[in-house]
Image: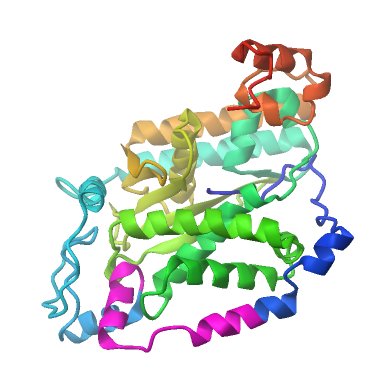
Amino acid sequence: MATDGALHPHHPRRAPVARSDEAQTTSLSRQQARRVREVHRGARPRRRTCDRTRAGTRAGGHDAGRAAQRGGHGTSMTRGCDSVDSGGVDQQPPLTPTQQRLLDQLRRDGDPLVFDADEIDDLVRRAHDVVAEVSARLGGERLVVSKGFLTQVHGCEARHLLPDSFRWNAATARGFVSHRAIELAAHWQGDPAPEVLVDEAIARLADQASYQGDFIAGLTDADRAELRAGAVERVTRFLQDFPPVPARSQPVYEARTRWAPPGCIELVGKTDLVIGRPNGRVSTKLVIDLKTGWPSPTHRDDLRFYALLETVVRRVPPRRLVTYYLDSAEADVEDVSMAVLETALARLEGGVRRHAELVADARPPLKRPGRSCRWCPALVTCDEGRAHLAALDDDGSQGFDD
């Protein structure tokens, strides 16, 4: 669900999605989107004290934060990621076993984590050196490095060099709609239903002048219903299974980080959720990525890249990396260490050097077949990919039916 909009320089800019006549006549126009938003605004619950408190406890509500600052009555924060009790009189429902299990994984255990400042400075210096060296080889041609870039260049090099052929559809759009709805839930006054949050997210996105907005505004009624159903399911699972996040933990949804050292290489990342207040050189932050589907080794690689990016930008690494799977309500957790950061730096160095070999040195790309071959635009002409997929299925359907 975490996405990166960055493209490496050989990818053309994505063209807006073409709309058919039928889509134009049945689509959610921008005027309709605004009307939908107005209807939902009118449907919001009245602002009661208990509603404001609940919103603050869920994640980032400002009323609970003000109550805590005043020292007056507020909601109990003992269930959050940092145990705090503000002496509240409003009792929240008890945590479910699923919420409690995840909360136990998120909580800090043991002494505060403080990395050696000299080791961090040395790591940042070596990251600068790698960027400077590869920038010189690229001759000043701008290169944007994201988690997706590294996954591709370390995978099939032939596919890595292909022009970007991504096109939005109802399935791929569920991710950014769900994320927007979850972000709205964190700051919404009251306790809205997931359907209201998703409809508001769709209306806001359709009203934007962007590729996502053009796609959503051009959806047919059937495609919009499919998108809505999938997003409502994801948002419901998150709200029901993820433990409430206290406002004092300063949660940030869709947190963007950018590092642009001297040279032509820029590192960018967007994290689904970051929790934790800065505290000097103490590592306090949890970096959380929300996923659907099956676990993959690349998911840990993605979070390690985020940890490295956070480190070179702020000189304080995060404390823990969490991949949370909405379908299974399970979390894969990894504590950040110097070994984790060194692994991330080595992967970054290997990725940008490999890209320079392919682009600047014109080295022939290596083909590395995998399950992702089924979505590769070059599959029709790739003998290696077709043979690999055919071997996955006894019926020769190339793995498209699972």
Q: Main secondary structure of the magenta part?
A: helix
Residue 35, percent from left and from top = 65, 82
Task: Using the rendered image of the protein, determine whether residue 256 is visible from the camera's viewpoint.
Answer: no
Magenta stretch, residue numbers: 35-60
Look at 42% across and 70% down and name the residue there. 193
Q: Is residue 17 left or right of residue 127?
A: right
Residue 55, percent from left and from top = 33, 75
Q: Is residue 58 magenta?
A: yes
Q: Is residue 285 left or right of residue 34?
A: left
Residue 66, percent from left and from top = 27, 84
**Residue toward you, 127 or 397:** 397
Q: Is residue 116 magenta?
A: no
The residue lying furthest to the right in this view is 21
**Residue toward you, 240 or 339:** 240
Tell me which corner region of the image, top left, top right, bottom left or bottom right, holds residue 147. top right
Way the structure is coloured: rainbow
Tell me which corner region of the image, top left, top right, bottom left or bottom right, holds residue 39. bottom right
Q: Is residue 290 above or below residue 183?
A: above
Look at 35% across and 88% down and name the residue there. 47
Quadrant location, the C terminus: top right
Task: Using the rendered image of the protein, determine whether residue 186 is visible from the camera's viewpoint.
Answer: yes
The residue lying furthest to the front in this view is 222
Look at 73% across and 28% down and name the residue there. 159
**Residue toward you, 169 or 74:** 169
Q: Is residue 339 above or below residue 73?
A: above
- Report how many numbered discs are placed on residues in the image: 0
